[in-house]
Structure formats: C-alpha cells, structure tokens
C-alpha cells in the first residue's frame, strides 16, 4: 500500500463510523461530570485532527508554490466558502512554518483550530522572526483559553514584538473603513460598519445600548437585542450625520505611555489592546476631558474617583503631540464621542472623558 492510501486508511480507521457508533451508544449511560469529560476528550481529539488537516493543507500549498488557486481548490474539496478556505490555507502556511509551537498545542488538544486561526491572523503582519518569538510567548498563555482570550493575548504579544509596525497597521486598517449590506431571507437584511475606528464604534454601541435599556426600563416588551437594532436604525434614519454626541469609552494606559515616554500597548475595554500611538491620539482628542482616579498600587482597585473634570493643559497637550510624531492622520475627527481614558501610574490615575 502506498503512502497516500495508508495515510487515508489510517485516518478513516481512527474516525470510523463503527468506533464512533460504539462511543455514541455509551454516552447515554454517563453522569453529568462524565458527560463533560467526554465532551472535553472529543474536543481534544478534534483539535488533533485539525492539526492533521492544517499539515495537509500546508503541504498542498508548498506543492503548489503558494499559488492563489489553492484557496479555490481547498474550497471545492472541503465544500467551504472561499473566505473560510483562505483562512484555513493561510493558517496552515503559518502553523507549518512560523508557528510550530501553536501547532504543537493543537497536537496536544490544548488549542482548537479556530483559536489557531486567531493566532495566525494576529501575527500575519509580523516578520518570520517576530512571529516565532510571539509563538514562543503564547505557548504558555493560550492553552485551554477561549478564542476571544486567544485573540487578545496574540494581538498584545504581536504589538509588543513590533510596536512601530502595530501603529502602521492600525492606521492602514482604519483607512479601510466601509459600510456593507448583506441581504438575508424572508424579509431581513444586515448592515455593518466594517473596520470603523474602535473608539467611535465603542461609543456608538454605548449610546445605542443606553437608549435601548432606557426604553426597556420604561415598559417596552421588545427584547434588548430587538431594541438595540431598532434604536440603531432609528438613529441612522432620523439622526444628523456628524452631529456631536457625548458618550464614553474606557481606555487603560500607563502614564509613561500617555506622555510618549514608552510605546506599551493600551487596552480598550471590551475590545482589547491597541497601539500606543492610537491610544494617545484618542486620549488627546479635541473633546477629551480628564478626571483623576486614585488606585491601589498593587491590586489596581479604584480607591477614589475624582468628581472634577478638566481639559489637559496646553503644555501637556503640546508635549504629547511632540512626543507622538507618528500617526497624526489628516481628516481624523472625534466630534461624535468623548473618551474616558484611565492612565495608571502607581498611586495615581487619570481618566479622560
């Protein structure tokens, strides 16, 4: 038997219907805890099989010399859409070249295929050397984490590996913002702002959610999801484009980052890490107002929230602008929101809103 037939036969043996039929028949006799253990074991097995699939796709891509036609070939063979096939192929190429430790985590059943795709996407813009460094950092950080935790950990590690590159990437991505519509069935459709500035998207959602909850508290019988959708559409149809609306997003950054003395990534609540240059731009917006917070130097627990708000002094604003010479994008405006920025420096924090 040649290698191909032997490999395929072995895979079919491992996942044979007969074996799985016996396993499925035994599940009815399991208690609650045993059922969870069985689900965990199945997930680990799926991850190991996904590692096999990624290796096979990586091999295919190398045989084809990285040709773009591989995506269509995979989409046809696996009966998936082109977009998903492209993600599988690019992840396979990364795992089998630049991310060997993440691939090893799939072999161990510690990370699933979807999580591995998050790592590949987060590191796609890095050099091979930086990607391998991030891969090593993540080896102990992402096992048994969910996909969103993996995405945030991978993005943070990638930003730390190439801080200048992260700033350029953020600027490029924000320049690609667009509005798309997707037609559905039975009288429904979806509208989406893709790649919008994270601070504006977060502020917009906060406003929509606030108004939806107010309606709900007032006796509305629609669900919150329905109310958010209806409020968003009402604002789009009846609102004034570009009209100022005060809202808040929470941005966490240390004082040295805020002052431009280092380029450590900041974190936006609900989103994850963003490059230091983008955080400084948000914090230095025209409508930004500062508010002081006192925190415990060890736990970070908030001890006192200042009531007074004030704008940054001209000297401080000039200092930040001089230190942050990059990412001064023309045409970027922040009239539609105000920003809460928590700037942590041991005992003292500052919040911009």
Image (cartoon, rainbow, N blue to C red):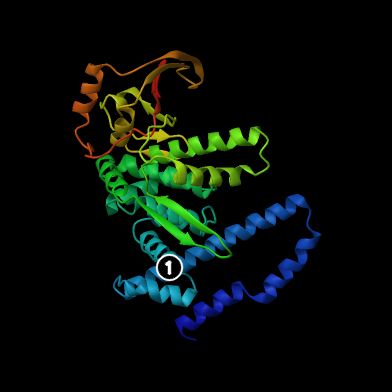
Q: Quadrant of residue 55?
A: bottom left
* Residue at x-position 30% and y-position 70%: 66
* Residue at x-position 34% and y-position 57%: 98
Image coordinates for residue 189, horizontal then vertical, percent = 51, 59
Q: Residue furthest bottom?
A: 1
Does residue 128 appear in the picture of this structure? yes
Looking at the image, which is closer to me, 92 or 82? 82
Q: Is residue 14 above or below residue 305?
A: below
Q: Residues within 10 Å of mark 1 (few under 14, many from 20)?
A: many
Image coordinates for residue 39, horizontal then vertical, percent = 66, 57
Image coordinates for residue 176, horizontal then vertical, percent = 31, 51
Which quadrant holds the C terminus?
top left
Q: Residue furthest right?
A: 29
How many numbered marks are there? 1
Q: Quadrant of residue 198?
A: top left
Does residue 105 appear in the picture of this structure? no
Task: Identify the residue under disc 1.
Answer: 85
Q: Is residue 179 above or below residue 223?
A: below
Q: Is residue 3 above or below residue 150?
A: below
Does residue 314 appear left or right of residue 207 in this picture? left
Image coordinates for residue 313, horizontal then vertical, percent = 27, 16
Does residue 164 appear left or right of residue 177 in this picture? left
* Residue at x-position 33% and y-position 75%: 69
Local SS, label 1: helix
Q: Is residue 13 above or below residue 285?
A: below
């Amino acid at each position: 038997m040649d290698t191909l037939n032997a490999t395929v036969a072995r895979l079919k043996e491992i996942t044979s219907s007969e074996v799985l039929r016996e396993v499925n028949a035994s599940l009815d006799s399991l208690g609650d805890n045993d059922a969870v253990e069985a689900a965990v074991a199945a997930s680990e097995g799926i991850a190991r099989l996904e590692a096999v699939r990624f290796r096979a796709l990586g091999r295919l891509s190398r045989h084809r010399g990285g040709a773009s036609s591989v995506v269509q070939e995979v989409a046809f063979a696996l009966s998936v859409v082109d977009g998903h096939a492209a993600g599988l192929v690019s992840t396979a190429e990364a795992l089998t070249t630049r991310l060997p430790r993440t691939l090893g985590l799939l072999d161990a059943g510690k990370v699933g295929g979807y999580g591995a795709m998050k790592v590949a996407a987060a590191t796609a813009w890095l050099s091979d050397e930086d990607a391998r460094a991030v891969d090593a950092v993540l080896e102990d950080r992402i096992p048994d984490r969910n996909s969103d935790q993996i995405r945030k950990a991978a993005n943070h590690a990638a930003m730390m590996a190439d801080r200048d590159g992260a700033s350029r990437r953020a600027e490029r991505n924000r320049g690609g913002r667009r509005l798309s519509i997707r037609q559905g069935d039975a009288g429904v459709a979806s509208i989406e702002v893709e790649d919008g500035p994270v601070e504006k998207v977060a502020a917009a959602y906060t406003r929509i959610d606030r108004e939806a909850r107010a309606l709900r508290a007032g006796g509305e019988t629609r669900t919150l999801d329905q109310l958010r959708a209806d409020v968003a559409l009402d604002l789009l149809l009846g609102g004034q484009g570009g009209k100022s609306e005060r809202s808040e997003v929470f941005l966490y950054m240390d004082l040295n980052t805020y002052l431009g003395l280092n380029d450590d990534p900041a974190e936006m609540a609900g989103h994850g890490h963003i490059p230091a240059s983008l955080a400084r731009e948000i914090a230095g917006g025209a409508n930004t107002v500062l508010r002081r917070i006192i925190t415990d130097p060890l736990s970070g627990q908030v001890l006192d929230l200042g009531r007074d708000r004030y704008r940054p002094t001209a000297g401080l604003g000039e200092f930040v602008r001089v230190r942050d010479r990059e990412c001064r994008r023309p045409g970027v405006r922040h009239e539609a929101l105000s920003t809460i920025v928590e700037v942590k420096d041991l005992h003292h924090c500052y919040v911009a809103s």
